[in-house]
Image (tube, helix red, strand yellow):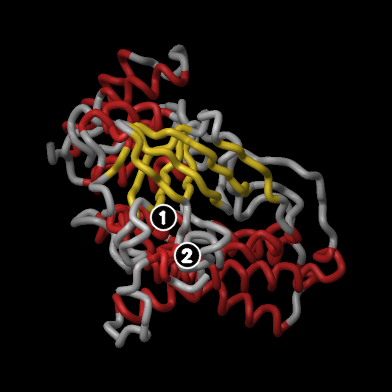
Amino acid sequence: MTDADELRSLVRRLLDEHPPATTDRTDFLKARFDAGLAWVHYPVGLGGLDAPRALQTVVDAELAAAGAPDNDPRRIGIGLGMAAPTLLAHGSDEVKRRFLRPLWVGEEVWCQLFSEPGAGSDLAALGTRAVKDGDDWVIDGQKVWTSSAHVARWAILIARTDPDAPKHRGITYFVCDMTDPGVEVRPLRQITGEAEFNEVFLTGVRIPDAHRLGATGDGWRVAQTTLMNERVSIGGARIPREGGMIGKVATTWRDRPELRTHDLHRRLLDLWVDAEVARLTGERLRQQLVAGQPGPEGSAMKLGFARLNQAISGLEVELLGEEGLLYGDWTMRRPELVDFTGRDAGYRYLRSKGNSIEGGTTEVLLNIVAERVLGLPPEPRNDKDVAWKDLAR
């Protein structure tokens, strides 16, 4: 299917058969998925129609105009932005049929078990072990900085299956059941006061081999699908002009003329232009996605996103003066979604500090952009051909 009018006809049929005003929200979303209108570029039977990716905007616009419910994408962002494209690219037919529908509808929340306290930014140095036991894998280890682990039903997980292989080649990728009795989730309270992140302890967790994505030992390649999509979903989200962080500061500037100074005006204009450049660059990146999978350009977008958010939130606190030093609420809570721009200026300033860590640290992303986008010589690495078990730790 390549025709926008055909898609509009399918949307009208969906709305006629399942009127949003009288249809249960979950039932409507399931019907939308089954009609192929969830993500139109996915295969038929998996929420799509094998249509060009660009036509998704036609569907979304028609449904929004009709007041149809969405699937609360911020709450299930890890599933939509990271797990789903990985499942589609590397999962078996059985895995795709089992997981994609409840993931998209929002019945099952996902989290990402990648980072570890002992590996730091060197993800390939991870030490969580997976040992084959019959038709299962037994997982033991610890993960950290896991968003939404406290509400997740499933997780995408990478673990070491061959300690005798070099660190990039002994990793395997799995789908982990977060309700397994060997999974323990503990909150990590952040500088904002919230515990949006968690640490996860895995003790004797059994994962069936059917929930392995890709070949044994090929997990690093599978993980690149996740990581490239993650950086696009964080740094390349579609926002309107003056959306996101810059919109908050621009609104304060217009509403509070007594706060204005010439120097702050100049700096705000510079950041406004930078934010608009980033927005338009994101649009171009999404156009490139129509032609294929995300590449290293997403790393540059995420890098710019972090720097821009931190600069804008800092300007906002400075603009507000003494008022900017206030903090609304330090209550410990475990939110169900990540909100980069919510609450007050103090929250935005503190939360933005994590932008240069999550989804790939700034230092790692600079290396990716230098080597894979600009084609510069790679940094010397003396551990690429050394068995993981022989690496210094």
Whole-percent x, y for residue 147 in the image: 56, 47
| Kind of residue indicated by mark 1 | Glu
Quarter residue 256 falls in: bottom right
Tell me which label, 1 or 2, sits earlier in the chain.
Answer: 1
Please name the residue shown 32% across and 35% down the image: 211
Residue 20 falls in image quadrant: top left
Is 329 situated left or right of 354 in this image?
right
Residue tagged 1: 230
Eyeballing the image, is 338 above or below 210?
A: below
- Classify 10 Å Cα crowding around label 2: few (below 14), some (14-19), many (20 and above): many
Give the distance between the C-alpha atoms of the residues marked 1 and 2, in whole angstroms: 9 Å
**What residue type is disc 2 on?**
Gly
| Helix, strand or loop under label 2 | loop
Relative image position of residue 236 (x, y in whole percent): 41, 59
Q: Nearer the viewer, residue 39 or 373?
A: 373
Instruction: Classify 357 as above or below 226.
Output: below
The residue under the point 59% across, 61% down is 245
Let me know if residue 279 appears in the view.
Answer: no
Q: Is residue 286 above or below residue 97?
A: below
Identity of the residue drawn at 53% across and 60% down: 358
Q: Is residue 327 left or right of residue 96?
A: right
Measuring from the top left, give residue 121's x and y in whole percent: 50, 67
- Disc 1 + disc 2, Cβ < 8 Å: yes
Write down the residue under mark 2. Answer: 360
